[in-house]
Image (tube, helix red, strand yellow):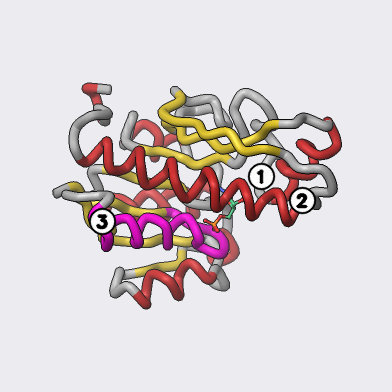
Amino acid sequence: MINICVLVSGGGTNLEAIYKAIENGDITGAKITRVISNNKNAYALERAKNHGTPAMVVSPKDFENREDFNKAWLQAIKEASPELIVLAGCLVNQPEAVIREFKNRIINIHPSLIPSFCGKGYYGLKVHEAVLRRGVKVTGATVHFVDEGIDTGHILAQKAVEVKDGDTPEVLQKRVMEEAEWVILPKVIGMISKGEIKIGEEA
Ligand code: GRF
């Protein structure tokens, strides 16, 4: 059984997809043991509570400086003793101390086909706005290891999604979530829990 700590900032639809995959047996041998958010208003916290998962907020607003926040953020994760950390709609750039402590044990879901439309400033709806501005016909989502960069870690899975005429950023975001994010994130977690994807030093 691997313990998973999920880091969130928003609606938590990717978190919900993981719960669903555990409940329907698509993911075996894994349990979400803690959900942590930097945003006290994140609906993802409500979802965690509905599933009986201990949830907590570590908000930068509650600390005098970023260094103190970083220490508290790392401490909150370490207390959960996770084998795997999942960034599921988490907008916190992980402190270097977290990346070091959990090398190749942190995965992220990004709503584009990396290396397109990723890096600084590309998150949430902004990704889909840029996709529509550029006029690409195919987009999608990517699951990757988190390293010191932004969206630069080793790619673990990707899934393509068609961009349709008349798409708005909101419509496209929903399609990418439904057809790609909510599929490949649980899939990768399932492969990790079965040892088909190595994590930690073995990766
Ligand atoms: C989504 O755009 C997702 O691609 C990105 O964060 C946003 C919110 O995800 N990673 P969620 O509903 O909070 O899982």
Name the residue: 77% across, 50% down.
Answer: 169
- Find disc 1 in the rendering and name its residue: 123
Q: Are marks 2 and 3 in contact (CB under 8 Å)?
A: no
The stretch drawn in magenta includes residue 154: no
Look at the image and tell me in which quarter the C terminus lies: top left
Q: CA distance from mark 1 to mark 3?
A: 27 Å
| 49 is higher (above) or lower (below) than 156 | below
Mark 1 and mark 3 lie on one chain; the one further toward the N terminus is: 3
Q: Position of residue 199 (x, y in %)?
A: 26, 30
193 sits left or right of 38 in the view: left
122 sits left or right of 54 in the view: right
Amino acid type, residue under disc 3 in the picture: Ala
Q: Are marks 1 and 3 in contact (CB under 8 Å)?
A: no
Q: Position of residue 144 (x, y in %)?
A: 45, 31
Crowd band around label 3 with a 10 angstrom C-alpha radius: few (<14), some (14–19), many (20+): some
The magenta segment: 7-25
The answer to which of 2 and 103 lies nearer the viewer is: 2
The residue mark sitting in front, 2 or 3, is: 2
Crowd band around label 1 with a 10 angstrom C-alpha radius: few (<14), some (14–19), many (20+): some
Name the residue: 53% across, 71% down.
Answer: 43
22 sits left or right of 151 in the view: left
Mark 2 and mark 1 lie on one chain; the one further toward the N terminus is: 1
- Find disc 3 in the rendering and name its residue: 80
| 54 is higher (above) or lower (below) than 163 | below
114 sits left or right of 155 in the view: right
- Find disc 2 in the rendering and name its residue: 169
Amino acid type, residue under disc 2 in the picture: Pro
The residue mark sitting in front, 1 or 3, is: 1
Mark 2 and mark 3 lie on one chain; the one further toward the N terminus is: 3
Disc 1 residue: CB within 8 Å of ligand 1: yes
